[in-house]
Image (spheres, rainbow, N blue to C red):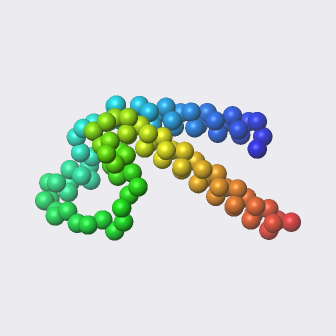
Amino acid sequence: MNTKNRNFLIGGLAIALFIAILAPFLASSNPDGLDSTVESLEVPESEAAFQSPLPDYAIPGMEDNPLGGVVSLVLGTILVLVVALGLAKLLSKKGNTKNE
């Protein structure tokens, strides 16, 4: 990875982490569009197909603490970055072998 791409990646990660840290403190306590629509239609709550590791952007047991939201958002941001970089590396290796 050249310096320009590395700096771009680090800058993007810094911005994403900054947003992840501030989001729990700036988020509205009102339900989002999907939640409010479900509530207004009085749709019965059903069992989820699978359990989320960090439900409602919080660590289980820390739902009322904004720090739980910060930690879960930071972990989620880093996890998405690692998965995206891994896929990019995998796909770039496959792409290089086809061109040669």
Instruction: Please say if 77 is above or below 27.
Output: below
Q: How many marks?
A: 0
Q: Quadrant of residue 26?
A: top left
Q: In the drawing, does residue 47 fall left or right of residue 82?
A: left
**Residue at the limit of the structure toward the right, as seen here:** 100
Of the pair 30 and 68, the residue shown nearer to us: 68
- In the rendered view, would you say 29 is above or below 45? above
Q: Is residue 33 above or below residue 66?
A: below
Q: Residue at x 36, y 45 (%)?
A: 58
In-image side of 77 versus 36 (left or right): right
Task: Say which quarter of the image contains residue 67.
Answer: top left
- Counting from the top left corner in percent of width and height, residue 34 is at 27, 53
State the residue at coordinates (41%, 37%): 70
Task: Estimate the x, y position of residue 41 in percent, counting from the top left.
Answer: 14, 59
**Residue situated furthest front in the rendering:** 61
From the viewer's perspective, is 76 left or right of 67? right
Task: Give the quarter of the image for residue 14.
Answer: top right
**Residue at (86, 66) in percent of width and height:** 100
**x, y percentage for residue 12?**
58, 37
Position above or below: 5 against 89:
above
Q: Nearer the viewer, residue 4 or 17?
A: 17
Percent of width and height locating residue 87: 64, 58
User: What residue sits 49% from the left and 44% below the top?
Assistant: 75
Task: For the N terminus, give its image quadrant.
Answer: top right
